[in-house]
Amino acid sequence: MGFLAGKRALIVGVASPRSIAWGIAEAMRDQGAELAYTYQNEKLLSRVEKIAADTGSRIVIPCDVASDEDIYNVFAELNKHWDSYDILVHSVGFAPREQLEGDYMDVITREGFQIAHDISSYSFAGLAKAGLSMMQGRDGAMLTLTYMGSVRALKSYNVMGLAKASLEANVRYMAQSLGPKGIRVNAISAGPIKTLAAAGISDFRKMLSHVEGTAPMRRTITPREVGDVAAFLCSDLASGVTGETTFVDAGYNILGMPELAGG
Ligand code: NAD
Ligand code: 0WE
């Protein structure tokens, strides 16, 4: 029996078979979890239906996290299938495309800032809050995905770095608030992976080859490797861990002077 046997997980953020959320769903399924999914819009529905079918789930619910109504509707719908749930996975990030191109001071705007923080950080607390009554008294766990751009200044990541810093603080405040209810809240800081969210980011291939030449493990990581750590953090094996950000990045973040580390 897997270490998530008897647990029910809601997965927010599948867009393609390359999505980190897809790797998380497969890992959780392999550990015995029962799964439900949301999808952002009709364009993504068929992909999400595929992962649902592959993981033995019939629960697929629409949710644009920009909408409070959608967020509340997710749990109204979920409640038609499940009377409670154990695990929330938030694998959502977005800033307007032009925010991720060019120099920070040239491209930052109030609107870009607001959208990035709303979709990438607030939505985690918003979903958690809307679904809280369904997680009461269950030793629940919540997980989000972040990136090292929250703690280091990188070229082009720009306002997403601020939004991820906010998301990581959100994890700590949610952990403080929900700990007394027996709910744990954590983040995984993943290394770069070629997903839809990375498509069209200029120099992304350069970033992947830089990591391959430099990271202690001399390679990048896969969605499934993130998924396996996600499954662990959301399981009772991690019952003493909350408010943490765990790096799954082949060790890249530990380096100083990374440009000299490739040897
Ligand atoms: P992805 O494109 O597969 O997933 C991003 C998801 O965000 C999609 O499913 C999309 O539908 C969803 N989304 C965006 N705006 C939304 C909205 N308004 N409402 C509902 N859903 C919305 O890409 P991914 O790389 O799997 O990204 C998942 C998470 O992992 C993101 O938080 C991202 O920042 C983070 N992350 C990615 C990498 C990487 O290199 N790919 C590295 C570290 C962290
Ligand atoms: O968090 C991310 C990417 C998030 C993202 C991607 C897009 C592309 C499409 C947010 N918003 C949008 N908006 C769009 O219109 N990553 C961790 C991947 C990523 O993106 C980068 C990176 C890395 C790594 C951008 C610049 C530099 C590095």
Image (tube, helix red, strand yellow):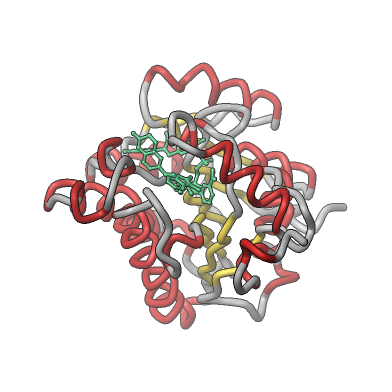
Which sits in the foreground, 261 or 46?
Answer: 261
* Quadrant of the rendering where the C terminus is positioned: bottom right
Identify the residue at horizontal 65%, vertical 81% (top origin). 240
Q: Position of residue 199 (x, y in %)?
A: 48, 30
Q: Residue furthest toward the right? A: 1
Q: Position of residue 164 (x, y in %)?
A: 39, 60
Report whether 127 appears left or right of 53: left
Report whether 144 appears left or right of 77: right
Instruction: In the rendered view, tell whether residue 168 sits above or below residue 32.
Output: below
Q: Quadrant of residue 30?
A: top right
Which sits in the foreground, 205 or 16?
Answer: 205
Identify the residue at horizontal 38%, vertical 67% (top origin). 165
Q: Quadrant of residue 75?
A: top left
Q: Position of residue 90 (x, y in %)?
A: 47, 50
Identify the residue at horizontal 67%, vertical 75% (top origin). 239
In the rendered picture of this protein, how many numbered marks are placed on residues?
A: 0
Can residue 252 be seen? yes
Which sits in the foreground, 21 or 161?
Answer: 161
Instruction: In the rendered view, tell whether residue 100 sits above or below residue 138.
Output: above
Can residue 21 be seen? no
Identify the residue at horizontal 56%, vertical 64% (top origin). 141
Report whether 36 appears left or right of 80: right
Instruction: In the rendered view, tell whether residue 186 sits above or below residue 62.
Output: below
Instruction: In the rendered view, tell whether residue 6 sits above or below residue 63.
Output: below
Q: Residue furthest toward the left? A: 110
Query: Quadrant location of ligand 2?
Result: top left
Q: Quadrant of residue 158?
A: bottom left
Q: Position of residue 24 (x, y in %)?
A: 65, 45
Report whether 43 appears left or right of 52: left
Which sits in the foreground, 119 or 214?
Answer: 214
